[in-house]
Image (spheres, rainbow, N blue to C red):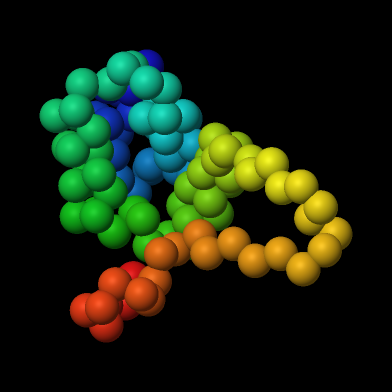
Amino acid sequence: TFKPLLKRLVETPEYFTAEDLTIALKHLFTAGAIDPTLIGSFLTALHVHRVERRPESLAAAASVLRSVALKAAVEASDEDFVVDIVGTGGDGYNLFN
């Protein structure tokens, strides 16, 4: 379950592995599986302990995100096709994401 993973992250972050992160993120992406306060605690602990900066954690997170990402159905994708996935520009405020 999620709570033992959160406990490991908070109490012994040096032993929080990429596999732990993978399991935790899969819980996070399961609708209604985790109380929002626990999600906030988890994300805060990831940042405070700098776990999110470890290369193996970044790779694990990217893998989970790719596995839950929605796939775009594109007709005639073999033709010239462009998708703006980040929403930068055009806001009139010169913001950068």
The answer, for residue 11, to whether it is visible in the render is no
Quarter of the rendering occupied by the N terminus? top left
Q: Position of residue 87 (x, y in %)?
A: 41, 64
Q: Position of residue 89 (x, y in %)?
A: 37, 76
Between 96 and 8, the one nearer to me in the picture: 96
Quarter of the rendering occupied by the C terminus? bottom left
Which of the 4 image quarters holds residue 13? Answer: top left
Q: Which residue is at 19% across, 47% downward?
A: 44
Q: Is residue 41 above or below residue 44?
A: above
Q: Position of residue 30 (x, y in %)?
A: 42, 22
The answer, for residue 43, to whether it is visible in the render is yes
Between 72 and 4, the one nearer to me in the picture: 72
**Left or right: where does residue 38 sit relative to residue 90?**
left
Q: Is residue 60 above or below residue 19?
A: below
Q: Which residue is at 69% across, 41% downward?
A: 73
Q: Is residue 78 above or below residue 63?
A: below
Q: Which residue is at 43% across, 39% downward?
A: 21
Name the residue furthest right: 78
